[in-house]
Image (spheres, rainbow, N blue to C red):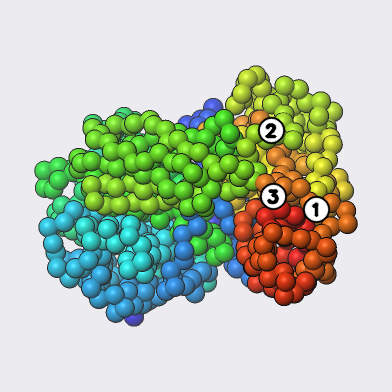
Amino acid sequence: AIALCLPFLMIGQTQERVSMVEVILEGKSIVDLAKLGLETDHGFYREGSYLINTFSASELASIKDAGFDYKIIDEDVVASFNKRIAAQRSGECDSYGGVRNYTTPDNFKLGSMGGYFTYQEMLDNLDAMANQFPDLITQRAQIGNFLTHDNNPIYWLRISDNANTDEPEKEVLYTALHHAREPGSLSQLIFFMWYLLENYDTDANVKDLVDNTELYFVPCLNPDGYLYNEFTNPDGGGFWRKNRRDNQDGTFGVDLNRNYGFGWGHDDSGSSPNTDGQTYREPGPFSEPETQAIKYLCEQHEFYAALNYHTYGNLLIYPWGYLDAKCPDSTEFTQIANAMTLQNSFTAGVGTETVGYVVNGDSDDWMYGEQGTKPKIYSMTPEVGESFWPDSNLIISLCRRTVWTNLVNANQVHTLGLVAVNPELIIRDDNQYINYSLSRVGAESGPIEVTFHELSGNLIQLDGSKTYNLMPTEVKEDTVFFQVKPGLPTGSILRFEQVVDNDGIIWRDTFERIYLGQASPAYEDKADNIDNWFTAADGGWGLDSSLYYSASASFGDSPNERYGREEFKFLILADPIDLTGLEKAFITFRATWDIEPGYDFAQVMASVDGTNFQPLCGRFTVNGTEDQDLDQPLYDGYQPEWVEELIDLSDYIQYGQVYIQFIFQSDRFSHGEGFNFDDFRVFTIEETSGLGAIAEQNPLFTIAPNPSTGLIEVQLKNYKSNSSVMPLKVYNALGKLVLLQNWEVNQDQTITLDLTDQPPGVYFIQLDNEKIQKVVLQK
């Protein structure tokens, strides 16, 4: 098929230079921009402020002629992409909000096109899946007899427990690459397919899903456009969007996501009648073989739900697209979307709530709206990531962002209840409980049983199971109570497993809490004033009375207003945090932010001398781009809800103190609400927590050497016991027993402990359940 395409590829237009541009929308509408035939459903959009997206030189001329002001952020994004390929390095933080660290499948390898798959590499992956797991996935097959304009077939595959037999099970659909310049949509789909296949025998959740569902995949809907990008930009970075129809007027291509039949051509802002427009819809609906193939596939099956993957924007879009209105099943869509975005926190909503305007002739409106030739499909469009061609070192992270979304898409066809645990991280003696909500997301009714297990052995009591029978879209709030073991060391980790039995289909997940007993924060600041912080006297951080978590203000980089352009602001805690004699230390705070992604950013930083600061990793940090602090942890994008951040300071304990600084930096382009934080707290845990007192001077036993590299000699000194055998225990800094050895005192007054298999850190040696000595392990 590739050889057949080459002659056609070579006679098309050459690709123009593509620039990253901020179009100023102050006093103007994004609808007016869309009427120019420009693609405005990607990028980063703030109503009445700006749209950041990629545009060609000819499109920029149209924008200028229409009276829009714009600023060029990156004059040649393709050249920049190629430069970044040679200069990439791994980030220090592998985090994206609440996304689980899903194991990368063994068979998932990055492609050779800037980290993304070539067309042949995609086919090779699909063939390898069928060869390795012939019972779980079908061989790739052509949809009907449909061939593209360049004579390429469009392939589909099915994953199920008896994949080669079409069983009477609920069906769901996944597609990618409606638009050829969105290779991340394909990458995440290949990642998810390998994830299902490789985890079928070891993950009960995956097995239950695959055993009871038929999952259909169309990994590349637009092979002609994708191959064209591969031909013009073999190292990645091609920006062709449409298919490769010859429009017979010197232009090429139809926007496949404006060519579906429901709401087609509703107006000229949601799609374009002009052949040179990026959103050209063609003279009639379903004119293209690619959309005809999807129509045929949907009419041959009874898909309950579909995800049509695109990039970019970190959005989840559902009908209606062609109207500024909600569809009849908007309550169901909203709840499903909330469940799908539980981990990745994508912004979810209809077109006007996400991309900011209406689109017509798109896949979701037809899949849901057309209910005559097929049943309605709960169809949505995820927009993944921050650009069309993210750096290759971000691909795995982007793939992980969608695993949960993909799992929910398939599980929603069954009885499905999802538990959302209250995110409060700290457990004290007066709040030994966890609040949670249970939402019925699934299509089928049935009992939903919720059980919590504690996995770290630190509880003596935990509430039992509860069973619920919920109505469609119903949400139930509830609480699970527990009791920690008496004397549990402060700082101990409570690790929980939540088990949701959805009428026989079981979902499991884990989460952790930190037990602090009766401990109070070593330092707390509720933003009542700014007396304990240093900032610039003019235009620095301040108290924001318009936005706060707890009354009546928060700390903000731009109090009560949007931040400006080309700003650098700092906020330093006046006094260092004392870390002397501590086992563990961390800070927590509530935060919300609205920051131009990829360019502006906020960071939390630490320093041992108050001068040289390093950025810190948190639960919600992401790795910076080359236009920020490259690969370093920072905050950007849009987080409208307050979240609880936690940052570990334990690496700084060895220095005895640490200074904390918040910074904010913006470029000369867009501006938003900035970064706000509230309820800043410092928690410290002393080394001897939960283990009694360190042995007095002239101890009854000695240890040497101290510090040690692993082999430790313990010598008894004039100690008498009622037993000839005494237990010798070694605990790590969290109070966990790592070694138990019985000492036969009458035989030997010296014993050697072997801790060479333990990591470096502070350990406590306890003799006869009484006396304790501390030892430092170094390697």
| Residue plotted at (71% across, 53% down) | 770
Residue type at the position of mark 3: Leu
Which label number is shown at residue 186? Answer: none
Query: Residue 144: x, y in percent?
Result: 16, 66
- Precedes in sequence: disc 2 or disc 3: 2
- Which mark sits nearer the N-terminus, 2 or 1? 2
* 1 vs 3, front mark: 1
Residue sitting farthest toward the front: 722
Dot 1 amino acid type: Ala
Residue 747 appears in the picture as rendered? yes
The residue that mark 3 highlights is 691
What amino acid type is highlighted by mark number 2?
Answer: Ser
Q: Residue 315: name its quadrant.
A: top left
The disc placed on residue 520 is 2
Measure the alpha-carbon separation of dots 2 and 1.
26 Å
- Where's residue 592, x and y in %? 59, 34
Asked whether 630 or 680 is in front, the reply is 680
Name the residue that disc number 1 marks. 695
Q: Is residue 464 above or below residue 558?
A: below
Corner quadrant of residue 140: bottom left
Residues at badges 1 and 3 in contact (C-beta under 8 Å)? no
Q: How far is the residue under mark 1 from the one under mark 3?
A: 11 Å
Give the image location of residue 734, x and y in percent. Answer: 65, 53
- Left or right? Give the position of 482 relative to 611: left
Q: Residues within 10 Å of mark 2 (few under 14, many from 20)?
A: few
